Image (cartoon, helix red, strand yellow):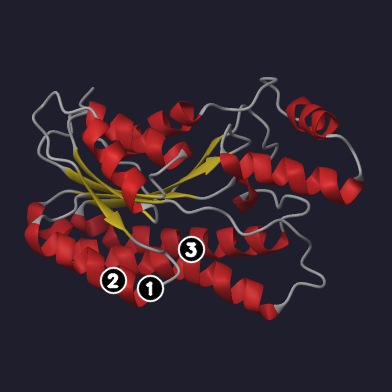
Amino acid sequence: MDLNLKGRHALVCGASQGIGLATARALADLGADVTLLARREERLRELAAALPASSGQAHGWISADAADTERLRAQVEALVAGKPVHILVNNSGGPPPGTIHGTDVAAFEAAYRQHLLANHVLAEAVIPGMERDGYGRIVNVISTSVKEPIKGLGVSNTTRWAVASWAKTLATELAPKGITVNNVLPGSTETPRIEQIIDTTAGKTGRSREDVFATMVAEIPMGRFAKPEETADAIAFLCSPAAAYITGVNLPVDGGRTRSL
């Protein structure tokens, strides 16, 4: 199985923690040059310096806010002008929990900008280089809510579906060029995002954090939350040469929690 990414350049978003950071490390382990993208400049500098580089890779970072799409576009266009990106991992923290009813329109606009529009801006910036070099992988880290809406995540459910539809359409358009576009759908994973959901649920219901946690774990057939590295390994596979004939799919990495096919 060909998992070798030596000579490939990966841009990983949301790479300062959680699934994004684990993905950056997994891709570097496979030989890719990795550029980390997130907001915290000092942390990115430290993390880039610590990435695996056994193949002599040159890693880097971009301090950017996904919500500022115009500046994001300029920063990534500057990056690819000197070093084309062959692998794009779109990943960003989810919108705050809450119901759809009673949510202000501004919350939807902000979520669409941070997720759908940012993903589109990044893809548009890197696709020309993928076409020139004959290698392209785009993986969007979304949520199992693409298959089954999750209670209490109204804005997130809506936004994730929009991203999934965008990705499926793009996958069809880019398939003749050998560029794949896939979505990885994490379930409950040991990240700051899941802590936010637990805290919000506990605060709104008056239940203890321990009770909320136990209820969430009970819904997972494997009986535990995922580790970020387990999701990252699925992403890294989809970025590899071995996954060249897989495109347009939604891959749950959720320990069996999603009941739909």
Crowd rating for badge 2 (residues with CA inside 10 Å; few <14, some 14–19, many 20+): many
The answer to whether marks 2 and 1 mark residues whose Cβ atoms lie closer than 8 Å is yes
Crowd rating for badge 3 (residues with CA inside 10 Å; few <14, some 14–19, many 20+): many
x, y (%) of residue 223?
70, 20
Left or right for 12, reference 81:
right
Residue 166 vs 140, above or below: the answer is below
Residue found at the very far right of the displayed protein:
206
Q: CA distance from mark 3 to mark 2?
A: 14 Å
Q: CA distance from mark 3 to mark 1?
A: 10 Å
Q: Circle 3 sits in a helix, a strand or a loop, which is it? A: helix
Residue 235 vs 145, above or below: the answer is above
Which of 66 and 176 lies nearest the eye of the viewer?
66
Q: CA distance from mark 2 to mark 1?
A: 6 Å
Kind of residue at disc 2 = Arg
Kind of residue at disc 3 = His
Q: Which residue is mark 1?
A: 69
The answer to whether marks 3 and 2 mark residues whose Cβ atoms lie closer than 8 Å is no
Q: Which residue is mark 3?
A: 115
Q: Circle 1 sits in a helix, a strand or a loop, which is it? A: helix
